[in-house]
Amino acid sequence: MTAGTLEPGRARPHPLGVPALSPVPPGWWFDSLLVAAFAALTAALVWWAPLLRLDIAVRDWSDAHRPTPVYVLMRALDYLGQGGALIVVTMLVSGRLAWRHRTARPVILAGLAPIISTLLIVGLKRGTSRGAPHHGSVRLFSHGPEVEYPSGHVSNAIVYYLVLAVLLAPYLAVPARRVLQWLPGVLTFIGTTYLNYHWLTDSIGGYLLGLLIARLLLRVPWRTVPLPRWLDRVPP
């Protein structure tokens, strides 16, 4: 029996249903650790010059080692974190599931993800005011027009593929769900850093915050959270 194929006599899988991604266990210690790690990284970028020198060294190495085939591959990896495209894809998938199952649960999840990401990531970008590897200053709070820290691409590739993994969990085998959930974030981290669209520490910061947002989304019991009947007509 392949993933997504129903056994005779069984109801079709509900959206956000079983099998689903493992929920975040009780307790906030790991979430607090992510916040502390991001705060420490930000403080180090302000007060610890060797970290800035590391960013510059990674940029210079990448510039000196970029053959055309690798460049093309890395462009593709970086595009995995393109926020606009990911929002469209997640909303289309959630809309299809919502229509099929007559419930707004998938759309609420897919719509909440960009709201949280935008408020957190864009707010930090504007507040830290850091340049890109070839445009503006490597230092934070440089008051330039660039807003590169933390990397939105890397955060996007964790958050939106998590949403897709949650939405498609009932239809995918466990290995496929794990790949969809975790691999795009790593690939985007490599691509955007190698191409010098972001400093190395931009990507690290984006990864930390992407994990934090993903954990916040997984804390919500999407299958059972109370909704008005007109938003949730899926049969029991």
Image (cartoon, helix red, strand yellow):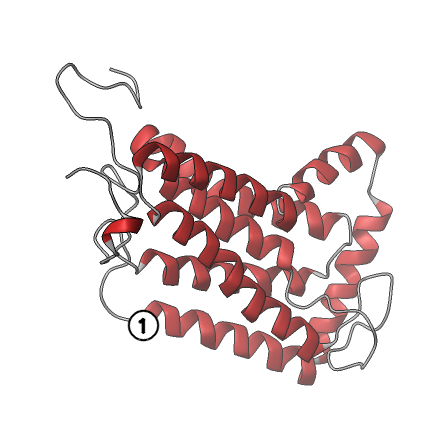
Among all residues in the image, which is located at the extreme front?
Answer: 230
Question: Which residue position is annotated with label 1?
Answer: 29
Does 107 appear above or below 89? below
Q: Is residue 152 above or below residue 4?
A: below
Which of 72 and 84 lies nearest the eye of the viewer? 84
- Within 10 Å of the Cα at label 1, are there few (<14), some (14-19), or many (20+) other Cα atoms? few
Say which residue appears at 74% left-offset and 76% top-offset: 129
Badge 1 element: helix
Q: Nearer the viewer, residue 159 or 29?
A: 159
> What residue is drawn where x is 66% and y is 39%?
77
Residue 193 on image: x %, y %: 70, 52
Amino acid found under the numbered disc labelled 1: Trp
Q: Is residue 120 left or right of residue 175?
A: right
**Can residue 123 be seen in this snapshot?**
yes
The location of residue 36, given as percent across then percent down, is 46, 77
Q: Is residue 54 left or right of residue 233?
A: right
Quadrant for the N terminus in the image: top left
Quadrant in which the C terminus is drawn? top left
Q: Residue at x 63, y 59 (%)?
A: 152
Q: Is residue 59 above or below residue 183?
A: below
Quadrant of the rendered image containing residue 118: bottom right
How many labels sit on residues? Answer: 1
Residue 67 lies left or right of residue 141; in this view the side is: right
- Report x, y in % for residue 171: 33, 29
* Residue 173 appears in the rendering: no
**Place of residue 176 in the rendered image (x, y in percent of width and height, measured from the top left):** 40, 31
